[in-house]
Each structure stands twice: as C-alpha cells, then as structure tokens.
Amino acid sequence: MLTTLLNFAVAEQWIQTNLAEFISLPELHEKELEPFTEIELHRLWDVYGKGDVFIGFILLMIYSGMMPGELFLFKKDMVDWDAYEIRGCGLKTKKRKETPIVFPDIIAPVLLDLCQQSKSRVGNVLCMNRDKFYQEYHSALQRAGVRDLPPYSCRHTTATALALGNIAPSVIQEVMRHTKFTTTQRYIHPDTAAAHKAVNQMDKGKAQ
C-alpha cells in the first residue's frame, strides 16, 4: 500500500523518487508457540493441590482449549455441569462462538473451585483486569517452576496432548472449535520423544 502511495506521489511530482524500492526488510521468522510438557503439567497440578487457586485458570485453559480472552467473558451461569460444557464465551469466529467449550471430568472440581472462589457481583469467574491477569499468570508459572510460556501455549498444549493421545483429527478440531483442520494442525507440536515412541510402535506388518 505504501509503495502504491509513493508511486502516486512520484507520478504527481510531489517527490522525485520512490525510496521504498531501496528498502530491504529482513525475512520474517514467526516464532512457533510451544506446549507445556507432561512434567510441567504435573508441577502445575502439584502447586494447585497445595492451594494455589489461580493455577486453576491455567489448568482450565490447558484441559479445555479455552482462549485467554474467553476467560474475561466467562460467567458462572455459562457452565452446564451435566453436559460438561461451557457456552456463551466463545470469541472471534462463528464456529468458536457457536460451539460449546467441553471440559473433562478431571477439570470439573477445579472449575467448581474457581466458581466458588469468585466474588463477582455479575457472575464473572475471573475477577481481575487483563494487566492483573497476565501479571498473575506469569507469577504462577514461576511459582510452579515451569517455563514462562505465553497463555496461548495452554491452547497449544490442548491440541498436542489430544494428538499424542491418538484422538481422531476431527475430534481434536471440534475440541479446538476450528472451522478447518489445517488450523488445528498449527496447534499440534509433537516433540522428538513422541516421534520415537510413535515409530517404535510400528511392527513389521504395519511398516510393509
């Protein structure tokens, strides 16, 4: 767009030359987010079990695929405890807004704890602004002794764990609430150890 504007300016003789032609930008390397490891998950559970309630929010995001921004919209009455679903706080896409967030049995007590701890008059489960949340998030990771990964790594952990658990791609896509599986694939990060485990499970019959 800037080049088009500059070409127009040159044509109108507002400037003498298009200097944008001489600009050389470095190649863009997009950093890939990493999931939390199994050891790090154990550490998070351990610290949560010792009374660190905030880590419950991190566990909720990891085990449900909930986006960080969805936590700010999440209210207690959005939980269907019988169906193990959360409805009404989906963000960005039509698919995420219409598809309920599912959570496993293991996270139900954590979710109940978070709801009971909330003192919000309007029913919010997370009772803090964004700045405070991100401050508490990074502090919680430090308390648990895990890597300081961004909140979105929780969602990447969801997809990766499901893939390593041999869950069908279509099911992973539904849990992640993606319209296309190509989007889901960007959230799956099997490590070298997982690759070795996978190839070691192949017998001679399967390899032929």
Image (cartoon, rainbow, N blue to C red):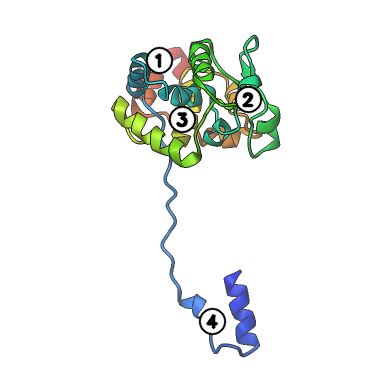
Q: Amino acid at mark 2?
A: Glu
Residue to which mark 2 is pinned = 174
Residue at 55% x, 31% y is 71
Tell me the distance, in whole angstroms, between the alpha carbons under discs 4 and 1: 60 Å
Position of 53 with respect to 102 (left or right) is left
Indicate the amino acid at tag 3.
Cys
Residue situated in front as seen by the camera: 73 or 203: 73
Residue extending farthest to the left is 145
Indicate which disc residue 33 carries.
none
Q: Nearer the viewer, residue 108 or 173?
A: 108
Q: Which residue is mark 1?
A: 201
Pick whichever of labels 1 and 3 is earlier in the sequence. Answer: 3
The CA span between labels 3 and 4 is 45 Å
- Of the numbered discs 2 and 1, the one sitting upstream in the chain is 2
4 vs 1, front mark: 4
Which comes sooner in the sequence, label 4 or label 2? 4
Q: Label 4 vs label 2: CA separation?
A: 49 Å
Location of mark 3 (residue): 154
User: How far from the left and from the top, in percent, is residue 180?
Assistant: 64, 34
Residue at image position (64%, 30%) is 89
Q: Residues within 10 Å of mark 3 (few under 14, many from 20)?
A: many
The residue tagged with tag 4: helix, strand or loop? loop
Q: Which is closer to the viewer, label 1 or label 3? A: 3
Asked which quadrant contains residue 85, the reply is top right
Q: Up-down: is 28 above or below 189?
A: below
